[in-house]
C-alpha cells in the first residue's frame, strides 16, 4: 500500500509539534530507562532553523516531525526526527527526511549530520539505507557512550 504525505514547516511551539516531541521523549525515556538520555543541550526555538510536521495527504492525520539545527554556514544537524509508531514503515520517515534535506540545501548546506542512540536500531538501519555514513562523534556527543553519529553530503 502506498501512502502520500504533506510535510510543512510550523512554529516550534505549534501544539502538534510539542505533542510529537513529547511522544518522542516518552519513547526514548522508556528505551534508555532515564528521563534525559540526550547528550548536550536540547534543541530550542532559538536554535532550530526549521521544524517540519508530516501529515497523511489522505486523512490529514498527524504522522511525524523533524527539524534542522544549523551547525555552521555549510552544515546542519537533524533534530527531533520522529514518526508515530502506527505510521512506521509507510514511507513517512523518508518523506520527512527528504523535506529536511531539501530545506538544508536551500539554506546553502553541503552536508547534514545527525546523532542517534545506540539502542535505536531501526533509526540506524533507516539512516544507513538513506545514504548516511557513520562518522566519529562530534560536538556535544564526543565522549557519549550512547551516541552514534552520521553524515550525508547533499
Image (cartoon, rainbow, N blue to C red):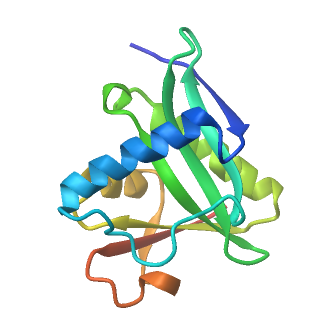
Which quadrant does the C terminus fall into? bottom right
| Total tally of numbered discs in the picture | 0
Could you tell whether 74 is left or right of 90 in the image? right
Up/down of 135 relative to 101, above or below = below
Q: Position of residue 136 (x, y in %)?
A: 42, 84
> Could you say which quadrant of the image residue 22 lies in?
top left
Task: Locate residue 90, reporting x and y percent.
Answer: 40, 26
Q: Is residue 109 visible?
A: yes
- Name the quadrant of the N terminus: top left
Q: Is residue 59 found left or right of 125 in the rendered image?
A: right
Which residue reaches farthest top? 58
Q: In the displayed image of the protein, which residue is found farthest to the bottom?
A: 143
User: Where's residue 63, x and y in %?
Assistant: 48, 28
- What residue is rendered at 67% in x and 75% in y? 71
Residue 75 in the image, given as x and y percentages of width and height? 69, 72
Q: Quadrant of residue 116?
A: bottom left
Q: Residue at x 82, y 64 (%)?
A: 108
- Whether residue 138 is visible here, answered yes or no, is no
Image check: 99 left or right of 94? right
Q: Report the residue at 64% width, 58% height from top.
A: 68
Q: Residue at x 69, y 66 (%)?
A: 47
Q: Is residue 71 above or below residue 29?
A: below
Q: Is residue 2 above or below residue 114?
A: above
Amino acid at each position: 500500500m502506498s501512502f502520500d504525505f504533506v510535510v510543512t514547516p510550523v512554529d516550534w511551539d505549534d501544539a502538534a509539534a510539542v505533542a510529537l516531541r513529547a511522544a518522542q521523549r516518552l519513547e526514548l525515556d522508556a528505551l534508555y530507562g532515564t528521563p534525559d538520555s540526550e547528550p548536550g543541550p536540547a534543541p530550542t526555538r532559538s536554535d532550530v532553523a526549521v521544524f517540519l510536521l508530516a501529515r497523511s495527504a489522505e486523512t490529514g492525520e498527524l504522522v511525524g516531525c523533524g527539524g534542522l539545527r544549523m551547525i555552521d554556514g555549510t552544515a546542519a544537524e537533524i533534530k527531533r526526527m520522529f514518526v508515530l509508531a502506527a505510521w512506521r514503515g509507510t514511507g513517512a520517515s523518508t518523506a520527512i527526511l527528504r523535506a529536511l534535506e531539501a530545506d538544508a540545501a536551500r539554506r546553502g548546506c553541503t552536508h547534514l549530520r545527525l546523532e542517534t542512540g545506540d539502542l535505536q536500531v531501526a533509526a540506524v538501519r533507516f539512516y544507513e539505507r538513506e545514504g548516511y555514513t557513520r562518522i566519529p562523534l562530534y560536538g556535544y556527543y564526543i565522549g557519549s557512550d550512547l551516541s552514534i553519529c552520521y553524515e550525508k553530503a547533499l
